[in-house]
Image: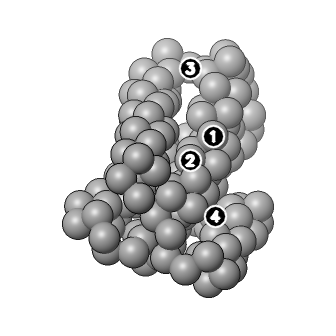
Amino acid sequence: MNTEDLISTLDDLIETSKDGEEGFKVCAENASGRHPQLKSMLAERGRECAAAARELQDLVRSHGGNPETKSSISGTLHRAWTDIKTAVTGKDDEAVLNECERGEDVAVRAYRKALDKDLPPHIRPIIARQYQGVLRNHDQIKVLRDHVRVNA
Protein backbone atom coordinates (compact mmCIF):
# COMPACT_ATOMS: atom_id res chain seq x y z
CA MET A 1 0.00 0.00 0.00
CA ASN A 2 1.49 3.32 -0.99
CA THR A 3 1.39 6.38 1.27
CA GLU A 4 -1.39 8.08 -0.70
CA ASP A 5 -3.65 5.01 -0.41
CA LEU A 6 -2.83 4.68 3.29
CA ILE A 7 -3.71 8.31 4.00
CA SER A 8 -6.94 7.97 2.00
CA THR A 9 -7.91 4.85 3.98
CA LEU A 10 -7.10 6.54 7.30
CA ASP A 11 -9.03 9.66 6.26
CA ASP A 12 -12.08 7.48 5.51
CA LEU A 13 -11.84 6.03 9.02
CA ILE A 14 -11.39 9.50 10.51
CA GLU A 15 -14.67 10.57 8.86
CA THR A 16 -16.31 7.40 10.19
CA SER A 17 -15.00 8.11 13.70
CA LYS A 18 -16.12 11.74 13.50
CA ASP A 19 -19.55 10.49 12.38
CA GLY A 20 -19.61 8.25 15.46
CA GLU A 21 -18.53 11.08 17.74
CA GLU A 22 -21.26 13.38 16.45
CA GLY A 23 -23.83 10.60 16.10
CA PHE A 24 -23.47 9.43 19.69
CA LYS A 25 -23.66 13.05 20.83
CA VAL A 26 -26.97 13.54 18.98
CA CYS A 27 -28.31 10.25 20.33
CA ALA A 28 -27.34 11.23 23.89
CA GLU A 29 -29.11 14.56 23.45
CA ASN A 30 -32.22 12.85 22.08
CA ALA A 31 -32.43 10.06 24.68
CA SER A 32 -35.41 10.49 27.00
CA GLY A 33 -33.66 10.15 30.31
CA ARG A 34 -36.01 7.35 31.41
CA HIS A 35 -33.03 5.00 31.42
CA PRO A 36 -30.55 6.81 33.69
CA GLN A 37 -27.30 5.46 32.30
CA LEU A 38 -28.24 5.66 28.63
CA LYS A 39 -27.32 9.33 28.09
CA SER A 40 -23.97 8.97 29.87
CA MET A 41 -23.12 5.73 28.03
CA LEU A 42 -23.90 7.32 24.64
CA ALA A 43 -21.84 10.40 25.51
CA GLU A 44 -18.92 8.17 26.56
CA ARG A 45 -19.10 6.26 23.26
CA GLY A 46 -18.92 9.62 21.48
CA ARG A 47 -15.78 10.53 23.42
CA GLU A 48 -14.22 7.18 22.50
CA CYS A 49 -14.94 7.83 18.82
CA ALA A 50 -13.30 11.26 19.16
CA ALA A 51 -10.20 9.62 20.67
CA ALA A 52 -10.09 7.12 17.80
CA ALA A 53 -10.29 9.98 15.28
CA ARG A 54 -7.41 11.80 17.01
CA GLU A 55 -5.29 8.65 16.94
CA LEU A 56 -5.96 8.22 13.22
CA GLN A 57 -5.22 11.91 12.57
CA ASP A 58 -1.86 11.47 14.29
CA LEU A 59 -1.11 8.52 12.00
CA VAL A 60 -1.93 10.59 8.92
CA ARG A 61 0.37 13.37 10.14
CA SER A 62 3.15 10.88 10.87
CA HIS A 63 2.94 9.80 7.22
CA GLY A 64 3.17 13.37 5.92
CA GLY A 65 -0.53 13.90 5.31
CA ASN A 66 -3.06 16.53 6.28
CA PRO A 67 -5.77 14.58 8.13
CA GLU A 68 -9.52 14.83 7.67
CA THR A 69 -11.15 16.94 10.37
CA LYS A 70 -14.87 16.63 9.64
CA SER A 71 -17.56 14.00 9.54
CA SER A 72 -19.01 12.78 6.26
CA ILE A 73 -21.96 14.27 4.41
CA SER A 74 -23.89 11.03 4.82
CA GLY A 75 -23.20 11.13 8.58
CA THR A 76 -24.48 14.69 8.76
CA LEU A 77 -27.64 13.68 6.92
CA HIS A 78 -28.13 10.68 9.21
CA ARG A 79 -27.85 12.91 12.30
CA ALA A 80 -30.39 15.32 10.84
CA TRP A 81 -32.72 12.37 10.18
CA THR A 82 -32.25 11.24 13.79
CA ASP A 83 -33.20 14.73 15.02
CA ILE A 84 -36.29 14.81 12.77
CA LYS A 85 -37.35 11.30 13.75
CA THR A 86 -36.97 12.13 17.44
CA ALA A 87 -38.98 15.32 16.99
CA VAL A 88 -41.81 13.33 15.39
CA THR A 89 -41.76 10.29 17.71
CA GLY A 90 -40.86 12.12 20.90
CA LYS A 91 -37.80 11.13 22.86
CA ASP A 92 -38.27 7.44 22.13
CA ASP A 93 -35.17 5.61 23.35
CA GLU A 94 -35.80 2.61 21.12
CA ALA A 95 -35.93 4.85 18.02
CA VAL A 96 -32.76 6.67 19.15
CA LEU A 97 -30.95 3.36 19.68
CA ASN A 98 -32.15 2.08 16.29
CA GLU A 99 -30.49 5.11 14.68
CA CYS A 100 -27.32 4.56 16.74
CA GLU A 101 -27.23 0.97 15.53
CA ARG A 102 -27.63 2.11 11.93
CA GLY A 103 -24.66 4.40 12.38
CA GLU A 104 -22.59 1.63 13.91
CA ASP A 105 -23.49 -0.67 10.97
CA VAL A 106 -21.79 1.89 8.71
CA ALA A 107 -18.74 1.99 11.00
CA VAL A 108 -18.45 -1.82 11.00
CA ARG A 109 -18.45 -1.83 7.18
CA ALA A 110 -15.87 0.98 6.98
CA TYR A 111 -13.45 -0.79 9.32
CA ARG A 112 -13.92 -4.14 7.58
CA LYS A 113 -13.17 -2.46 4.26
CA ALA A 114 -9.98 -0.94 5.71
CA LEU A 115 -8.88 -4.25 7.23
CA ASP A 116 -9.38 -5.99 3.87
CA LYS A 117 -6.61 -3.78 2.48
CA ASP A 118 -2.87 -4.42 2.62
CA LEU A 119 -2.24 -2.16 5.62
CA PRO A 120 1.33 -1.65 6.86
CA PRO A 121 2.25 -3.88 9.81
CA HIS A 122 2.52 -0.95 12.24
CA ILE A 123 -0.97 0.34 11.25
CA ARG A 124 -2.98 -2.90 11.09
CA PRO A 125 -3.03 -3.55 14.87
CA ILE A 126 -4.30 -0.01 15.54
CA ILE A 127 -7.12 -0.39 13.02
CA ALA A 128 -7.92 -3.89 14.33
CA ARG A 129 -8.10 -2.57 17.93
CA GLN A 130 -10.37 0.27 16.89
CA TYR A 131 -12.52 -2.19 14.93
CA GLN A 132 -12.99 -4.22 18.11
CA GLY A 133 -14.25 -1.05 19.80
CA VAL A 134 -16.71 -0.49 16.93
CA LEU A 135 -17.98 -4.06 17.30
CA ARG A 136 -18.34 -3.58 21.07
CA ASN A 137 -20.30 -0.35 20.51
CA HIS A 138 -22.55 -2.08 17.98
CA ASP A 139 -23.24 -5.01 20.30
CA GLN A 140 -23.89 -2.78 23.33
CA ILE A 141 -26.32 -0.64 21.35
CA LYS A 142 -28.23 -3.77 20.25
CA VAL A 143 -28.42 -5.07 23.83
CA LEU A 144 -29.59 -1.69 25.13
CA ARG A 145 -32.18 -1.35 22.38
CA ASP A 146 -33.55 -4.81 23.15
CA HIS A 147 -33.62 -3.96 26.87
CA VAL A 148 -35.47 -0.70 26.21
CA ARG A 149 -37.91 -2.51 23.90
CA VAL A 150 -38.75 -5.11 26.56
CA ASN A 151 -39.04 -2.53 29.34
CA ALA A 152 -41.02 0.06 27.39
Are discs 2 and 1 less than 8 Å apart at CB?
yes
- The residue singled out by tag 4 in the image is 71
For badge 3, the amino acid type reads Pro
Residue at mark 3 to residue at mark 4: CA–CA distance = 25 Å
For badge 1, the amino acid type reads Asp
Of tags 3 and 4, the one toward the viewer is: 4
Residue at mark 2 to residue at mark 1: CA–CA distance = 6 Å
Are discs 3 and 1 less than 8 Å apart at CB?
no
- The residue singled out by tag 1 in the image is 105
Are discs 3 and 4 less than 8 Å apart at CB?
no
Q: Tell me residue 130's x, y (percent).
A: 43, 34
For badge 2, the amino acid type reads Glu
Q: Tell me residue 73's x, y (percent).
A: 76, 66
Are discs 2 and 3 less than 8 Å apart at CB?
no
Looking at marks 4 and 2 on the same chain, the residue that comes earlier in the sequence is marked by 4
Residue drawn at the location 46% of the way across and 64% of the way down? 93
Looking at marks 4 and 1 on the same chain, the residue that comes earlier in the sequence is marked by 4
* Residue 29, image quadrant: bottom left
- The residue singled out by tag 2 in the image is 101
- Residue 75 visible to an observer of this rendering: yes
Q: Which mark is residue 152?
A: none
